[in-house]
Amino acid sequence: MLQRLGSRFVAMGLVLTCAACGGGGGSGADSAGTGSNGAAGATTPASNPAPASSPTPASSPTPASSPSGASDASATTPKLAAATPIIDGTTLGGAIWPAGATSSGGTGQPVGGLNCALRSTAYTYAHLSIYQNGQLLTLPPSIGMVEPTMTTPTGCAYPVHTVDSSGKIHMDATTGATYTLGQFFSIWGEPLSASNVAGLSGAPIAIYVNNGGTLTQYTGDPASLVLTPHAEITIMVGTPVTQVPTYTWTDPPPFDPNPVTLVFGGVVGTSFWPNGTTSTGGTGTPVDGLTCAPDMSVLYHVHAHLAIIKDGQWLALPMNVGILSQCTYEMHTHDNTGIIHIEAPNLKTYTLGEFFDIWGEPLTNTNVAGIMGNVVAYINDNGDSRRYMGDLRSIELTSLRDITLQIGTPPVSTLATYSWYEPQ
């Protein structure tokens, strides 16, 4: 899906002052353990986060120099580094592993007693940092996420998975189940032992766990390490670091407890744009490879939702975008509810940028259909929410995905949830 190859040994992050942090393993972690899904205990940023296009690199903790004759990582006892403020969705580290699970990992089948299914309605998270010789490596996105198919248009996700490159491991919080680091690595399809971490085997290997500001070294079987909410796990392969990182997270806003009921033909928001496709949008010829047909064969049919909020005001998405007198595009709107219908003869990747091209309106990280300003984007997949920090045009439109684009101030205080008129 949420192009992430970077320098092998470059540690990156956003260092941003956050007025309200959902809390990692350091100070500021909420006791409810609800995490980035925004349920009870999460906090809402008091100020508009900085633009996604202007990250400030975060430096890696300094590698520890190995004492003469030292044979293991415990020869140097690290300390907790000062907490680094991070916006949810930020990429941390340098990419060496590809996105998603490997062919031996979770591809839809049960793994380690965990099933792949429609995502749950509430999540918490733990954080994993992997260092090789003092350099932070990126935990890949989309581990435990299985792409949609024609027969399963919603795709599926394992109860423990990643959605971005921030190092967060999202965990289903609805069942009360506990999960282990070994289960996550099994879903990833990578080895985990005292001598091998995802193919990295340089000795020594040391594991530290930060729980609420208390740092302890873990010396048991790495696969048996329990992933507790907001714990920060650091694995050092080779030369250790002298300071173990800790983060304070600007999490997504909490969910509004009152769902918005979407009614076919209804309106959500204030009228702002004229209905229909603009003169620069789709006129009947293919747009970005998406066709317009008078009688489209519909074998793949899913819905996503787009909410555009300008200076606190919800703007209604126009109806009949992509619907012309002579044909209808594979992506279109029927009403002003914000639902984007994908009705197509086959499965392919559909993006928000393609929808805006059919509409005939610009979409960048500073321009949403002619509205200029810093754009903050949130994605919610059935309760699995996060800040999106990449190119807005690349956001995939998948079944029941909710996308919120906030322009201007004040920042949104809650993320809307919806009662869909065409559930899947």
Image (cartoon, grey):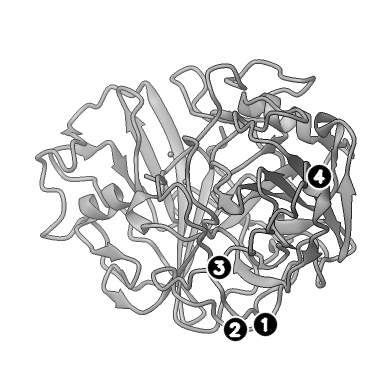
Q: Earlier in the sequence, mark 1 or mark 4?
A: 1
| Mark 2–mark 1 CB contact (< 8 Å) | yes
Number of callouts in the render? 4
Q: Which residue lies under the disc numbered 3? A: 59
222 left or right of 423 in image: right
Q: Quadrant of the N terminus?
A: top left
State whether residue 213 is above or below residue 106: below
92 or 63: nearer the viewer = 63
Q: Which residue lies under the disc numbered 2? A: 47
Give how far across and how far down residue 118 sits, in percent: 64, 32
* Badge 4: residue crowd in 10 Å (few <14, some 14–19, many ≥20): many
Residue 173: mark in rendering: 4
Mark 1 to mark 4: distance in Å? 26 Å
* Discs 1/4, front: 1
The quarter of the displayed image where residue 202 is located: top right
* Badge 1: residue crowd in 10 Å (few <14, some 14–19, many ≥20): some
* Discs 4/3, front: 3
Residue 19: mark in rendering: 1
At a point 54% along the width and 24% down the height, the residue shown is 102
Q: Earlier in the sequence, mark 3 or mark 1?
A: 1
Q: Earlier in the sequence, mark 2 or mark 1?
A: 1
